[in-house]
Image (spheres, rainbow, N blue to C red):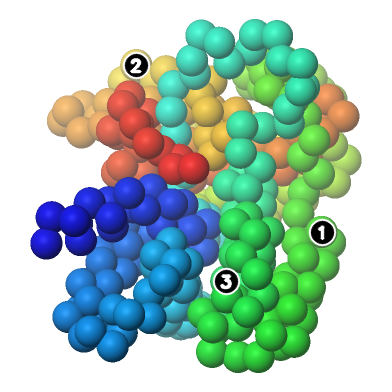
Amino acid sequence: MQDLVTDFEAERDHLTAVAYRMLGSRAEAEDAVQEAWLRYSAALADPAVRAEIRDLRGWLTTATARICLDVLRSARVRREAYPGQWLPEPLVSRIASSTFGPDPADRVVRDDEIGMALMVVLERLTPEQRVAFVLHEAFKVPFDGIAAALGTTVPAARQLASRARRAVNDGAPRHRATLAEQRRVLEAFVDATETGDIQALVAVLAPDVVFIGDSGGHFPAARKPIEGAVQVARFVFGLLRRMPTETTGVRTEIVEVNGGLGLLFDAVYQDGRPFRSVLSFAVDDGRITAAFNQLNPEKMARVLHTADDAPGWPPR
């Protein structure tokens, strides 16, 4: 039994990484991995099935993908009734001192596969397309393995991945800035909002910028994306004025959000309850091309912990 547990635990981070990219929720990802454990332990009780497991990682990845596919299919129904816009649960951590040091690779973000811009556009895919895309693009699973996970043929799996890739390429906001450039842009954004300079804020926004907010119905939020530099700038200033008036000591901090940079707004209600929201960005050519505002307290609950101590998140 101990060997069984040890073998599975060695794959837990990998499976959680697969599930988060498919589901956009840390809690749902962890639930999916737990279900995969139950299926694995049940499978090993059958000697015939146990003999078929020659590639443990491949078997567990397929099992996790099938679980995520079921969750995605049911989630589509839930999200149709969701109040306003839906954004993934952000993965937030405080910035390490070495984040902006010399980097010969001049990387864009720490992990493009979980960047918020990509996670948002993945929501527009069908469940089958999303599973195929994540398995093929992020984890290089061969198409026969993807077909097994989806219960379809190899040509059909290949077509699903191809359509998903085209949809992602066509729909994802431009986001090619290095972390150092992202920091410069975010500092200009903060300076403009703190001084109330709407022209300076418009200057840091791309003409076709889009702003998406998810409050889960707990706070006033735009029910549709805001588009255009002037429109987004006006909305941002209005949003800041509507920050909960019952809070004190609002603090703004640049943090890592899904491998890129974002802003953490941290405050405390007068009765001692914490208030936090995360604003993440896509940045290209010195301007913000998209902004994603997560203030749904149900999705921010883990940020209360992960911003301070997030070992293993995001998993690799």
Q: From the top left corner, tell me how far across and down residue 46 is, in percent.
A: 21, 85
Alpha carbon of mark 1 to alpha carbon of mark 2: how far? Answer: 41 Å
Q: Is residue 70 above or below residue 264?
A: below
Q: Where residue 295 sits: x, y (%)?
A: 43, 44
Which one is closest to the eye, mark 3 or mark 1? 3
Q: Residues within 10 Å of mark 3 (few under 14, many from 20)?
A: many
Residue 315 drawn at (x, y percent): 44, 43
| Amino acid tagged 1 | Asn
In this view, the residue in front, 75 or 188, is 75
Which is more foreground, mark 2 or mark 3?
A: 3
Q: Earlier in the sequence, mark 3 or mark 1?
A: 3
For numbered disc 2, what is the local secondary structure? strand
Quarter that holds the N terminus: bottom left
Q: Could you tell me the amino acid type at mark 3? A: Val
Nearer to us in this view, 237 or 166: 166
Disc 3: which residue: 131
Q: Tell whether 159 sits left or right of 118.
A: right
- Mark 1 = which residue? 169
**Number of marks in picture:** 3
Q: Which residue is mark 2?
A: 249
SS of the residue at dot 3? helix
| Label 2 CA crowd tier, 10 Å (few <14, some 14–19, many 20+) | few
